[in-house]
Image (cartoon, rainbow, N blue to C red):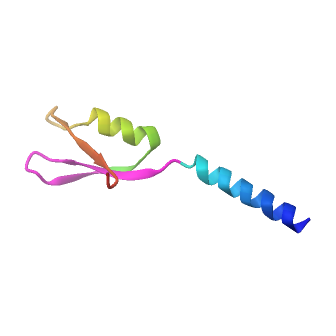
Amino acid sequence: MKTKLFFAATLLIASVACNKEECYECHYDGPNGEEVELEGEYCGDAAEDLENAGFVGPDSTVYVVHCGEH
């Protein structure tokens, strides 16, 4: 009985961990080469979309965004 409960608990924890999206802090390189941090964290598709689309600055310039360490 204890073995079955342990196995069920392990399976539940593994399934929850697999569904969690990875979240990242993101930044862009400003006009003078400085790193400008974006507020908050971006997770999963939101981080990927931000990297693909870029960040539109106050001067309407689109900056390349980097999230995480990749």
Please indicate whether residue 67 sits to the left or right of residue 30 in the image.
right
Q: Relative to 10, is 57 above or below?
A: above
Q: Residue at x 67, y 50 (%)?
A: 15
Judge whether residue 29 is colored magenta.
yes
In magenta segment, residue 11: no
Residue 9 in the image: x percent, y percent? 76, 60
Q: Residue at x 33, y 38 (%)?
A: 50
Q: Is residue 24 above or below residue 47?
A: below
Q: Is residue 46 above or below residue 8?
A: above
The outermost residue toward the left is: 32
Where residue 5 appears, x then y in whole percent?
84, 62
**For the point 92% across and 65% down, which residue is it?**
1
In the rendered image, residue 69, in percent from the top left (x then y), is placed at 32, 55
Q: Position of residue 38 (x, y in %)?
A: 29, 49
Identify the magenta region. Answer: 21-38
Asked if residue 15 is positioned above or below residue 52 in the image, the reply reads below
